[in-house]
Amino acid sequence: MHALVTGGAGFIGSHLCDALASAGHTVTVLDDLSTGHLENLASCPHRFIRGDVSQFDDVLEAVRGVDCVFHLAAIASVPKTVADPRRSQAVNLGGTFNVLEACRAHGVKRVVLASSAAVYGMGTGKPEFESDLPAPASPYALEKLSSEYYLQIYASLYGLETVALRFFNVFGPRQDPSSPYSGVISLFCKHLSQKMPVTIYGDGEQSRDFVSVFDVVRALILASQLSDPKGTVCNVARGESVTINTLYRELAALYHCDLKPQYAPAREGDPRLSVASVEKAERVLGFKAALSLKEGLLRLVQG
């Protein structure tokens, strides 16, 4: 298989490229390097195209000759999409449209989209099912949901094979802790490794469904192999939630750090509970997260 990975120099994308190349597939990467890094691809044989998914000509060039597109390129920061919704729309929704149109032009049959649990909004305090009514609360969430709908329409109208995976809280190596929008785990690791105090927003009893990037990559590859997907949408998570306080204790123990966390007021818009139903992913994709939170954290800390 010749695979194109948009956003392939980023956190999740580079791990996907590694796995694809290791399995003997040909890899092309399209990335504008706004958040990705070429060093993430140092060990992966690939063809690199520096380009922007919001520019159709860039996407059209990258898609030529490929069998499957893994569309991961996005402005993934919710605050950034709130601050600049015009640019966010051009990249997150316009980029998806460009990928679909380029695939239609070149006869590429399969597109796998990285979507997000953000489409569920603030949640109900119960496990999120793919059949639940979406409630996007940010430009980012709306653009991901709209991208899913585009995939379903292109599957229905043009016979494109499409799958959208709603990632929950992904963590692992290469997640950039220098970004203020980085995941909580990478930020905790950065501070604990330097024996610096950690700030927890709220009381720390809010909970999240954390999933290792290595499991996420496996789900992406399974999605590329799914027969007759017809616009399928699946959650990708462990199906278990953990409080931020518990997460902190687990990481502090791995770093042999006895610093107590500092607490600050809760951030507006943060869901209290986020946890996925993983029944559909198991049934349709044959996917079940293999790494427990402890195992994933240990792999992260040990490098």
Image (cartoon, rainbow, N blue to C red):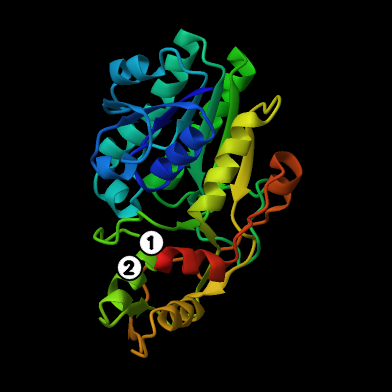
Q: Can residue 167 be seen in this snapshot?
A: no
- Label 1 sits on a secondary structure element that is loop
Residue at position x 42%, y 31% in the image: 5
Vertically, is 87 above or below 130? above
Residue 1 got which mark? none
Amino acid type indicated by mark 1: Gly
| Residue 204 drawn at (x, y percent) | 45, 80
Residue at position x 50%, y 27% in the image: 25
- The answer to which quarter of the image holds residue 195 is bottom left
Front-most of residues 230 and 142: 230
Front-most of residues 114 and 15: 15
Vertically, is 273 above or below 251? above
Vertically, is 25 above or below 271? above
- Label 2 sits on a secondary structure element that is helix
Tags 2 and 1 touching, CB below 8 Å = yes
Q: Which residue is mark 1?
A: 183
Q: Determine crowd level at label 2: few under 14, some 14-19, many 20+ residues with C-alpha closer than 10 A.
A: some
Q: Which residue is mark 2?
A: 187
